[in-house]
Image (cartoon, rainbow, N blue to C red):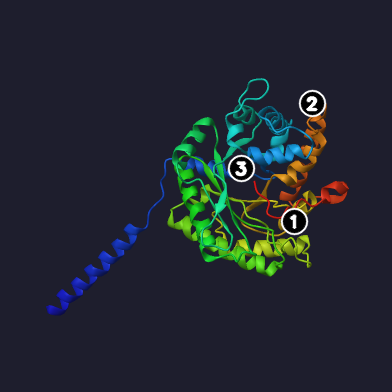
Amino acid sequence: MAFALKSAASAKAVRAQTASRRSAVVVRAGKYDEELIKTANAVASPGRGILAMDESNATCGKRLDSIGVENNEENRRAYRELLVSAPGLNKYISGAILFEETLYQNTKSGKKFVDLMNENGIIPGIKVDKGLAPLANSNGESWCMGLDGLDKRTADYYKAGARFAKWRSVVSIPAGPSTIAVRDCAYGLARYAAISQASGLVPIVEPEVLLDGEHDIDRTLEVAEAVWAETFKYLADNKVLFEGILLKPAMVTPGAECKNRAGPEKVADYTLKMLRRRVPPAVPGIMFLSGGQSELEATLNLNAMNQKPNPWHVSFSYARALQNTVLKTWQGKPENVQAAQEALMKRAKANSDAQLGKYDPSTESKSAAEGMYQKGYTY
């Protein structure tokens, strides 16, 4: 009798422990979950990528200054309108990341930018971070500002028409990176991602491992794996819906000042190795940043990755690697708009072909191979 009572008590305790474990597993059923998944998959659609045009007004000013054009609101509007109004751009570009000024701005004809983009089949995105600041007690590293008030801002951005968001943190290999810098980068991205999803915005998760440094490709792989492990740990802790996010990693390459360069095949092998080790297949899209690579290099590396099987939509979210030739062609002159848009279409098509693994570099000009790396580059 005593044995029977003890067995019954033991079985009851096991059932209680099992129930407790089950209650700790949260089944995700957020307000925007279906929409988030739909948006993420629309951005990560075959043959298409993201046009990153979210440079701050100061950075946009540097770009304009490089062609002798004054940095004012009208010139910024004219340039950004040139980009998103290019006829047929949606064949190659699924979404465009905007700076806050552009999200609320009208075109020259008075139409809202977001309305123009939606009419042209391009999903509006929005940069939501507030930039980098020095990280105290670190090795000269940075942390990303912007969590304060983010819930209200993301809700307002959704009402204004944005459907995905971007937050860029950075990790410096020459600086270590320190444990505190990697952890802050990962945790900030996770909190941003959770807040964005609660407002209906698909978060682009971007812990950029900077090109700066003399390190080799093996060191880049080591750091990238550590950064993404930490990032996904905090994304999971914050119950972020993986099917409703997009990633924006740097490709795994040697440091910009490393003498031993790596060709597209090696970059593809190392980058896909890192992704397979760290990124769940539930994530719909990997939208690579160009990070100062030349237009040609960024496209060749993307094409090489799409020659190999992988469970994701491996594509692009390029700024300079899409815009460099466009800006030089435009020169701030209305009569050059059509030629500049044609230059944009050429680069967009090249990267679309690379996303499909069908890129042919034989038609590229010499200027496409010009490097765009800037040490300590800031947005």
**Amino acid, disc 2:** Pro
Considering the numbered disc 1 on the image, is that residue within a helix, a strand or a loop? helix
What residue occupies the far left of the structure in this picture? 1
Q: Earlier in the sequence, mark 3 or mark 2?
A: 3
Secondary structure, mark 3, is helix
The residue beneath circle 2 is: 334
How crowded pointer 1 is (Cα within 10 Å; few <14, some 14-19, many 20+) is rated as many
- In the picture, the disc for residue 43 is 3
Tell me the kind of residue under disc 3.
Val
Q: Can you tell which of label 3 and label 2 is closer to the viewer?
A: 2
Residue 149: percent from left, percent from top? 45, 41
Q: Where is residue 34 in the image (x, y as percent from the top left)?
A: 48, 42
Residue 273 position by quadrant = bottom right
Which numbered marker is on residue 148?
none
Please, what is the three-letter code of the amino acid marked with disc 1? Asn
Front residue (pair 106, 140): 140
The vertical placement of 375 against 202, above or below, is: below
- Residue 301 shows which numbered tag? 1
Q: How many marks?
A: 3
Q: Residue furthest top?
A: 109
